[in-house]
Image: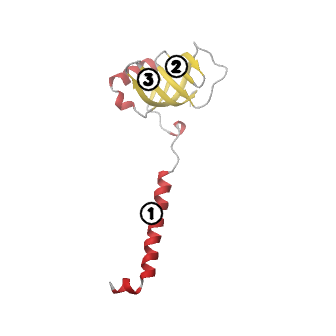
């Protein structure tokens, strides 16, 4: 205790340095960039019908999972597409020169399954074999 009385300035400086270092490391950890779909490992590759069956069986296991699927493009609306009338995809970039009825392959992250509409929802979707 006598050291503390004699060296109050040093003790305050040490506490401030430890606090500043902790704050810096906390902010650095909190604001680190998220992994994109391109950087994440694909957990499933295949067709839309098989994926829908698996997701319906246990939707909670498919949350935040990256998949690479092939299906028939049934709807285009700006930056969203629908595959086989059952998989709703939010695209990373708008698409051009593509029409409904074509078979396409997409890679994206599953964000959930809507029981009411019986529709799988995906985001960060990119078109093509990535």
Residue 104 at what x, y percent from top left?
A: 56, 20
The residue that appears at 47% across and 54% down in the rendered structure is 29
**Quadrant location, the N terminus:** bottom left
What residue does disc 3 label? 120
Q: Percent from the top left, x then y, of residue 94? A: 63, 27
Residue 42 position within the rendered picture, expressed as x and y whole percent measured from the top left: 47, 33
Helix, strand or loop for disc 2: strand
The numbered mark at residue 87 is none
Drawn side of residue 80 relative to residue 30, left or right: right
Residue 127: quarter of image: top right
- Mark 1–mark 3 Cα distance, whole angstroms, equals 42 Å
Tell me the distance, in whole angstroms, between the alpha carbons under discs 2 and 3: 10 Å
In this view, the residue farthest toward the top is 101
Nearer the N terminus, badge 2 or badge 3?
Answer: 2
Q: Which mark is residue 82?
A: 2
Report the Cα–Cα distance between label 1 and label 2: 46 Å
The residue at which mark 1 appears reads as 22
Choose the circle earlier in sequence order: 1 or 3: 1
Disc 1 crowd, CA 10 A, few/some/many (<14, 14-19, 20+): few
76 lies above or below 91: above
Q: Secondary structure at mark 1?
A: helix
The label nearer to you, 1 versus 3, is 1
Please tell me which residue is depicted at 58% across the width and 32% down the height of the picture.
92
Residue situated in front as seen by the camera: 4 or 63: 4
Q: Could you tell me which residue is drawn at 36 percent across and 22 percent down?
A: 56
* First in sequence: mark 1 vs mark 2: 1
């Amino acid at each position: 205790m006598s050291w503390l009385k004699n060296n109050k300035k040093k003790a305050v400086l040490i506490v401030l340095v430890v606090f500043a270092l902790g704050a810096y490391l906390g902010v650095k950890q909190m604001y680190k960039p998220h992994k994109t779909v391109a950087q994440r490992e694909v957990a499933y590759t295949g067709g839309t019908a098989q994926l829908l069956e698996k997701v319906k069986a246990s939707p909670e296991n498919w949350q935040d999972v990256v998949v690479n699927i092939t299906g028939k493009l049934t709807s285009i609306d700006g930056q969203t597409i629908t595959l086989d009338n059952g998989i709703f995809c939010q695209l990373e970039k708008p698409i051009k020169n593509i029409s409904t009825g074509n078979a396409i392959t997409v890679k994206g992250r599953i964000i959930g399954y809507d029981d009411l509409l019986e529709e799988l929802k995906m985001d960060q979707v990119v078109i093509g074999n990535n």
